[in-house]
Image: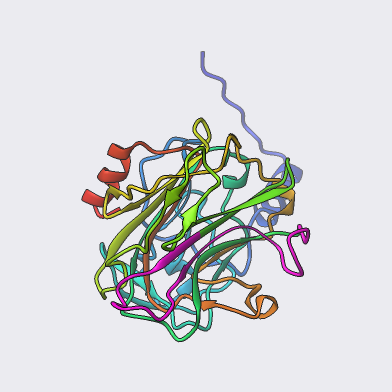
């Protein structure tokens, strides 16, 4: 059955014009064309920045394709990426987003994947790839719910890296460091002797993925589609529970709390295809991201 409504009253026309005008968002780049990924509404991919824009507007070049969310600033330089364009950090600044969308509401298990390219040892002790700043100051004079850093040190060859992934659980009010840095890791049921991650800063693009599986309380590091043999366990922790109301944004290529930390620096290499998933991807899923340059 077809319903047809005809509105001819002048008051309705005026009201319609006012409604349309009030819904416009001012001072925001038009959407235009930006990379999209197959993902149903509410699907597992919660945030995706391909950095593929070729416009003169740096905000458009770093748009998140899941909710068409633009960063508040993007001071990084566009470079050729693993697929299309990428961004290049200089160790002094980072891209700031209001949030990783609803990732923090679905991070009981999660996957974070991206491509990175770096040449040798940086100027500082540690380089942050991303941070979820937090209003929770319980963990020191600064606050963050999650971050990843490559702590490079002074060993040889310079293609090796310490990799450190930090997580906070707002339910248990506890935190944990997952580290690959040639030390004995004791939080799991069996001690694990980790090692530096080789060949990740040899000035070539490498695909990096971290998969936290709540069913096993384990964090697996993948490099170029291959799982690192040192799978790290957070005891019997299970689901990671993050309070979304405490998350104060998403920093890609840095950590806004660096001045309070007194150590480390922002990222000074290339970054491409940044993805946050609200589930633990399988090994074949991670391999597919690598094979397809995603």
Query: From this viewpoint, is residue 112 visible?
Result: no
Q: Is 71 drawn above or below residue 11 in the view shown?
A: below
| Residue at image location 57% in from the left, 39% down from the top | 235
Quadrant of the rendered image containing residue 102:
top right
Q: Position of residue 200 (x, y in %)?
A: 31, 67
Q: Nearer the viewer, residue 66 or 189?
A: 189
Q: Which residues are magenta?
A: 136-164
Q: Position of residue 267 (x, y in %)?
A: 46, 75
Q: Is 122 drawn above or below residue 20 in the view shown?
A: below
Residue farthest left in this picture: 291
Residue farthest top in this picture: 1
Quadrant of the rendered image containing residue 56:
bottom left
Query: From this viewpoint, is residue 264 visible?
Result: yes
Kindly report the secondary structure that dominates the magenta region of the rendered protein.
loop
| Residue at image location 59% in from the left, 71% down from the top | 255
Total number of numbered labels? 0
Q: Is 198 drawn above or below residue 209 in the view shown?
A: below
Q: Position of residue 173 (x, y in %)?
A: 74, 47
Q: Position of residue 46 (x, y in %)?
A: 50, 45
| Residue at image location 70% in from the left, 77% down from the top | 260
In magenta stretch: residue 279: no
């Amino acid at each position: 059955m077809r319903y047809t409504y005809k509105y001819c009253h002048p008051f309705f026309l005026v009201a319609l014009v006012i409604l349309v005008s009030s819904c416009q968002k001012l001072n925001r780049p038009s959407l235009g064309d930006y990379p999209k990924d197959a993902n149903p509404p509410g699907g597992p991919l919660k945030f995706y920045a391909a950095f593929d824009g070729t416009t003169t507007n740096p905000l458009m070049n770093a748009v998140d394709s899941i909710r068409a969310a633009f960063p508040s600033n993007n001071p990084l330089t566009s470079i050729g990426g693993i697929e299309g364009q990428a961004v290049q950090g200089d160790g002094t600044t980072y891209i700031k987003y209001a949030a990783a969308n609803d990732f923090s509401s679905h991070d009981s298990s999660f996957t974070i994947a991206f491509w990175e390219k770096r040449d040798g040892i940086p100027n500082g002790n540690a380089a942050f790839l991303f941070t979820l700043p937090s209003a929770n100051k319980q963990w020191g004079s600064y606050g963050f719910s999650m971050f990843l850093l490559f702590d490079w040190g002074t060993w040889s060859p310079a293609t090796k890296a310490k990799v450190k992934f930090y997580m906070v659980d707002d339910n248990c009010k506890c935190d944990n460091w997952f580290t690959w840095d040639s030390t004995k890791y004791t939080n799991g049921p069996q001690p694990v002797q980790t090692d530096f991650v080789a060949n990740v800063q040899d000035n070539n693009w490498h695909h990096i993925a971290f998969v936290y599986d709540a069913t096993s309380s384990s964090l697996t590091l993948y490099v170029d589609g291959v799982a690192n043999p040192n799978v790290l366990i957070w005891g019997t922790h299970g689901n990671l529970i993050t309070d979304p109301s405490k998350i104060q944004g998403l920093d890609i290529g840095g950590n806004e709390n660096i001045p309070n930390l007194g150590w480390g620096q922002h990222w000074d290499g290339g970054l491409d295809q940044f993805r946050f998933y609200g589930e633990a991807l399988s090994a074949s899923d991670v391999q597919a991201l690598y094979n397809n340059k995603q």
